[in-house]
Structure formats: C-alpha cells, structure tokens
Amino acid sequence: MPMPFDLTIVTVCRNAAGTIVETLRSVAEQKTSDVEYLVIDGASTDETISKVRSHQEIVDHFTSEPDRGLYHAMNKGAELAKGEYVCYLNADDIYLPNAVNTVLSYIKKFPEVDMFYADWIGVQTGNVVRHRKAELSLGWRYKLCHQAIIVRRDILGKNPFNERYKICADFDAIQEWICRGVITKHIPNALVRFSEDGLSNRAVNRACQESIEIAIRRLGIFNSWRFCLSTVLHWAKMSLINIFSINK
C-alpha cells in the first residue's frame, strides 16, 4: 500500500523556545501536501509548546511528554511517520531555500534509492559559515550529518536508533544501513544550516569514544582504522581548543 506522504520531516525538541520558531518557519515556507511534519517534544518547561502550537497549521502531529533523551524522541518520530521517506530537522536547524522541493524531486526521479545524503552549511563559533560536502566512505573524508540524510521509511524501522549511545546513535544507524547494502545517492546541494557547536562537540570525549566503538563494531579495525585515527586527532584538537579557551 502506498504511503500517504512522500516525505516525513521530524523535529525533536526540549526547551527550545529560543530557536524553534526559526525552524518552524523554514518548514512552513516549503511544506507541501506531499510532506508530513511531526514535532516530538520532551515535556518542555519553557515556551516551546506554545510556540509550536502557534504554528499548528503546518504540524501534522505534535506530542509533548517525558522521554529518555534525544534518540528515544527520534525513535518516536520514526514509529509515527507516514512518509515514504523520513528526515530529521533539529529545533535549532533550518532548511535552506528550495531544500524540501529538491528532496522531493530526487525522491520522484530516483525511486530505487533507499538513502539520500546531502551537503550542509555548518555554523561555527564566531558565526563562521562553511559549506560541508557530504562524503559517504568511512575514512579520512567521512562527512555526514543526520539532518541531511533522507532514508526510506521501511529501512528506518520502528526503533532505528540505539539508545545505548547518547551522542552517536545516528552514526550507528547510518553504518547499519550501509552495511545492509542500501542503495544510496548523493544530493550535491546544501539542504540545511545548523550549528556545529552542538552536543557532539561539547561532549567530545564521549562522542569520540562512541564513534570509534561503532566503527570498529560495524566494520572491524582493518576497515575503520583511518576513521578511528582521524577521530582521535579530532579529539586532540578539540581538547586543546577547550584548554586554551579555559585559560584565556
């Protein structure tokens, strides 16, 4: 039976009143009848809920209740989604102009593809903006972000994200899909803009530990040693930056 939507966009949030309006507006500007939009809130105690309800005309499903964290909320979205494909847009991210239309055109043009991966715009401390080109191979140049991943709903499954991982469960899920041999295609357009000073950089020790564990478990040390080494180098770089920042 065909799915009722071509695409489901899921936003998970908690106490995101300061940023979620911009996210909602970016969806509102591009949402069509082919697109379902879900907002999964983790029982916010600020004005997040009222801000979402003020945009209820674009939200097909909204829930607000306690959860076990980011990936539990993302799993809720996966289970509720009714789109042929699913993607995630965090509550402090925005779609760039024409992003959703680009995704829909690729979905219709390449129906055999299970997972699309696209470029993105990363914003760093000091409002430094960089265009990031997506790279699928697990090596020196591995670069993917889950906000620029669009995956077929039946590949995603009901519980795709392993809640054991607190920072890198999306990386784990993507590696699982790739190991399963899903058909992939690169979209050479930047679709989203998001801050690169997020949780994975604030908790760099745990992020590096989780990503190395996942890479070795999924692919073995022989196939992942370059990625592991680059991750260790990234950890060293971020640790030095944090030390110098504290000492200023």
Image (cartoon, rainbow, N blue to C red):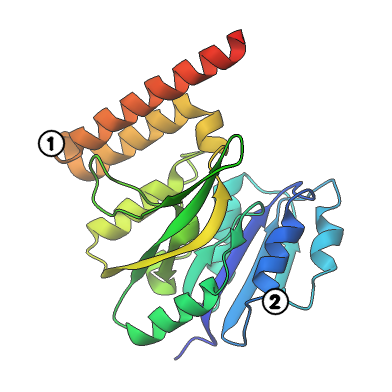
| Mark carried by residue 237 | none
Whole-percent x and y of residue 6? 50, 83
Whole-percent x and y of residue 227? 25, 37
For the point 40% across and 86% down, the residue is 108
Q: What quarter of the picture does the C terminus occupy?
A: top right
For the point 20% across and 35% down, the residue is 226
For the point 68% across and 75% down, the residue is 29
**Label 2 packing within 10 angstroms: few (<14), some (14-19), many (20+):** few
**Image height of 87 relative to 130, above or below:** below
Residue 84 seen anywhere in this rendered image of the structure: no
The residue singled out by tag 2 in the image is 60
The residue singled out by tag 1 in the image is 222
From the viewer's perspective, is 162 left or right of 78?
A: left
**Label 1 packing within 10 angstroms: few (<14), some (14-19), many (20+):** few
Looking at the image, the residue that sits furthest to the bottom is 1
Q: Quick one: label 1 or label 2, which is nearer the N terminus?
A: 2
Q: What quarter of the picture does the N terminus occupy?
A: bottom left
**Image height of 138 relative to 180, above or below:** above
